[in-house]
Amino acid sequence: MAKYLISFPSAAMVVPEGELEAVGRDARAAIDEAKAAGVYVFAGGIDESVPPVLVAADGAVAGGGYSWAPTLNGGFTVLELPSRDEAVAWAARIAKACRCDQELRVFGFDPQS
């Protein structure tokens, strides 16, 4: 089985006023369904109030991430699924719950992990 990343950037989630509580409830329900189905690996959102740091091989820490890369933010879900079709179906569930489209990517297989 492959692991799939289902994600969205913060700017994609535009929730009409008064619906934020329902979005949170629906998103938690989708994650609970993934857990019950035994496909859940990890989910969460980037805490945008904590700025990123760049850590060098020697342990030196610099404020900010890569200056040339897009900002990494938003929500992420990792599920382990038997097929891309099932990954698309789960991404659609999460998109419906979050009220925004989701990006779907597959992790490369690593036999050592």
Image (cartoon, grey):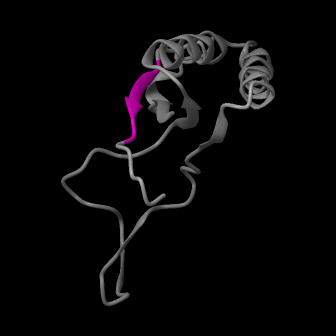
Q: Kindly identify the residue that appears in the image at 44 percent across and 32 percent down.
A: 9
Percent of width and height locating residue 29: 79, 21
User: What's drawn in magenta, residue-wise?
Assistant: 102-107
Residue 79: give x, y in percent of width and height.
58, 33
Q: Position of residue 44 (x, y in %)?
A: 63, 42
In the rendered image, residue 86 lying in the magenta stretch gets the answer no
Looking at the image, which residue is at 55% across and 11% down? Answer: 89
- Residue 105: x and y in percent read 38, 30
The one nearer the camera, 59 or 11, is 59
The answer to whether 50 appears left or right of 107 in the picture is right
Assign the magenta stretch its main secondary structure. Answer: strand
From this view, report whether residue 33 is shown above or below residue 48.
Answer: above
3 to 69, vertically: above or below: above
Whether residue 106 is in magenta: the answer is: yes
Image: 17 above or below 81:
above
Extreme residue in the bottom direction? 58
Residue located at (23% from left, 58% from top) = 67
**Which of the two residues, 61 or 32, is positioned nearer the viewer here?**
32
